[in-house]
Image: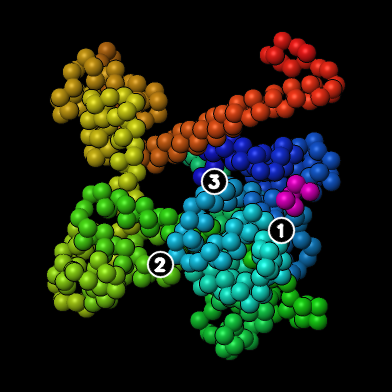
Amino acid sequence: MATPYGIKLAVHLITNHFGNLVAKVCENLLRRGPLTLQQVIRYTELTPQQVKNSLLILIQHNCIQAFSFESQGGFGDGPKANTQYLALFGNILHRMRFPKFLEIVSRELDQECKELLEGLLQNGRLTLVQMVERAKSKRKDGCREDVVQEGLTKLLAAHFVERCPAPEPLVPEPVKVETTSKKRGAKSAKINEESETIEQRVLAAAGPMEAQRFSMITNTEFDVNGETSTDDSPSLIVGEKRKRDSLELDRESTAEEGEVVLWRANFEEFLRRLRHMACIENVRASLDDGAVKVLKAKLDATRGLEKKVKTEKSVPLSLDNIFEEVIKSEEGRVMTLDDVRASLVQLGCPASARGTADSYSIDLKKIIESAQNDEVESIVLKRYGRDAYRIFRLLSKNGRLVETDKISDTTFVEKKDAPKILYKMWKDEYLHMEKLVLAPNRNILLWKVNKRPLWEHVLDEMFHAALNLSLRAAYEWDKEKEPEMRAALELRVQAGGPRFKIKGSGGV
């Protein structure tokens, strides 16, 4: 979600990595939405060549996606609209998580895979030939191509690496729906929803077919093991068939000159792993070790079956299958079937009344929301104190409007202090307030926690904090380097170099 400070943080990251010109282009795309080349040139006031180079850099590093709207006449009919460029806010922020991505691969795979992923993170996207050349340059004794290909195969099998999306997919034009609403802010909410829909459409249209996404095949008839693949299944949806037909046409046109496949890191898989790790750690803090073992085993077994990153419920598994996954690990072999059943009850899965044939699904959304509640409550406790913490916790659990006196009575906060605390949290956008007029001279204030806008506000505060930390770290780094630079300049002067004044040294 691109919040105000989130955009500032993203621009700061691009500035540090690629310089001011690229950051200026990226900032305009983040703030204005999809733009054509001519629009970017006009808004940034840069030369066309500078804008083109900046866009190429951002595309190379998966920070923007080019696309064109499909004409109304149908697929491939009529002229296409100008190419537009969409900033991928999430991909830009993922650059802060690169060390975590490398840590995951280092823990689950080998050093060769880690070095291949490091090359992809540093360069954005690479071909197999470029990976081999990079591996050879990193080692004195060189590196065989089959070793690099084996490492890439492992990364693809774990879904840590994927094929790059189409360079400029065709996207159906969004249907403009005119709606009227008396509520303030409805228009902006509609615009935000539309923007998210466009991004989802672009990414869906650009992504390769699932069968091709994690495969090293360069010909649709054979996979990496030489087995024949059949894509003519009647179960293929229309969009997948269209992508397949497009791939076939591209392959026929490039068959003579050879197909060049670009690879990149699959951020979705890393986010899925980090999300699962967060769920496990949250359960570890509130439940026993048995529940942790069951949750970890279930997530590991069904990770590859999840269709999206933010899955609300885990993929269903029977009790026997869950028990089989639990006892695969050394620490899980001490658990019995009854222990697993009891842990599932702790995790919010009701006990099966028909034996072990029923499926169990864990509510991951509830675990994430619990962790979010704990995080925000800890912020309230540190910022506003114990009384405010009790008030906020009451309103958060209540989920409805509560009047001031009832809040004071329930939380045992002094009636003279409660309005001050409530007003302070409302002013900082942690609470929602409504005024109820009972009589000309009598008003009642009602208070509530609106979680969705509150989570957005807290997220924006976190982006602000991350930006401040990054700026502070850069300042401290420059401060440490300043004495070394001063000493080098002093040595240059003593050696007979040009005479000039050094700030703070009293002059030379």
**For marks 2 and 1 on the same chain, the one whose residue lies earlier in the sequence:** 1
- Considering every residue shown, the one lying at the far front of the view is 495
Question: Which residue is label 2 attached to?
Answer: 303
Viewer-nearest residue: 167 or 399: 167
Quick check: 456 above or below 194?
A: above
Question: Which residue is label 1 attached to?
Answer: 68
Q: Position of residue 130 (x, y in %)?
A: 71, 66
Q: Which residues fall within the magenta stretch?
A: 53-57
Q: Amino acid at mark 2?
A: Arg
Q: Pointers 2 and 1 in contact (CB under 8 A)?
A: no
* Magenta residue check for 225: no
Q: From where the camera sits, is residue 463 visible? A: yes
Residue 95 relative to residue 289: left or right? right
Q: Position of residue 254 (x, y in %)?
A: 78, 77
Q: How far apart are labels 2 and 1 at the CA level?
A: 33 Å
Look at the magenta stretch and give its main secondary structure: helix
Closer to the observer: label 3 or label 2?
Answer: 3
> How many residues crowd mark 1 within 10 Å: few (<14), some (14–19), many (20+)?
some
**For marks 3 and 2 on the same chain, the one whose residue lies earlier in the sequence:** 3
Q: Give the image quarter of residue 452.
A: top left
Q: Position of residue 321 (x, y in %)?
A: 27, 76
Q: Position of residue 196 (x, y in %)?
A: 55, 50
**For marks 3 and 1 on the same chain, the one whose residue lies earlier in the sequence:** 1
Q: Which mark is residue 96?
A: 3
Q: How far apart are labels 3 and 1 at the CA level?
A: 30 Å
Quick check: 271 above or below 320?
A: above
Mark count: 3
Q: How far apart are labels 3 and 2 at the CA level?
A: 24 Å
Colour option used: rainbow
